[in-house]
Amino acid sequence: MKRTVLIAAMLTTAATTVLAQNAQTRRLEVTGAPRGDLRNGPLTYTGSPVNAKVSTLTIRASQAVVTAPTGTPLVQAEGKKTGTFTGTVQVNRGRLSARGEKLTYSEASGQGVLSGTPAPALPLSVRKTVTP
């Protein structure tokens, strides 16, 4: 219950940070057929929606672009990639969810920033029944 209240409070700011649990669970997995340079990147995923996962966090978006650090081939960038999700982005972890216009996630830091007027994805009536 407190988690829902906490995430609702966090989402009132201009950007929200999503944190993966540890280095081994930071791996970004995007499903679908990518377009782009498979060796060096970037890879672009489009769909209705594009689905991705980081540990127990699920991400749905209109488009995703996965890149590697400059000078590093994408195939060797495990744990260093960046995923940028755009369009209507929805992030879920368990019963908590949020939505926004853009999510940028870094495997290196395990942090994602949800921007573009982030908001709780729960119906208003559900949020009203939560007590701290």
Image (cartoon, helix red, strand yellow):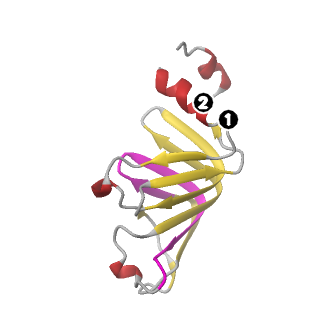
Q: Is residue 7 magenta?
A: no
**At numbered mark 2, what does the secondary structure look like: helix, strand or loop?**
helix
Packing grade of label 2 (10 A; few <14, some 14-19, many >=20) is many
**Residue 14, quarter of picture:** top right
Residue at (45, 49) in percent of width and height: 58
Q: Is residue 68 magenta?
A: yes
- Magenta stretch in the rendered image: 51-70
Main SS of the magenta part reads strand
Packing grade of label 1 (10 A; few <14, some 14-19, many >=20) is few
Report the front residue among 11 and 92: 11
Measured as percent of width and height from the top left, residue 121 is found at: 61, 36
Q: Is residue 7 above or below residue 17?
A: above
Q: Is residue 61 above or below residue 96?
A: below
Q: Amino acid at mark 1?
A: Thr
Q: Which residue is mark 2?
A: 8
The answer to whether the residues at label 1 and label 2 have Cβ atoms under 8 Å apart is yes
Residue that lies at the very extreme toward the front in this rendered image: 109
Measured as percent of width and height from the top left, residue 16 is found at: 59, 44
Q: Which residue is mark 1?
A: 12
Residue 42 relative to residue 110: left or right: right
Q: Amino acid at mark 2?
A: Ala
**Residue 53, quarter of picture:** bottom left
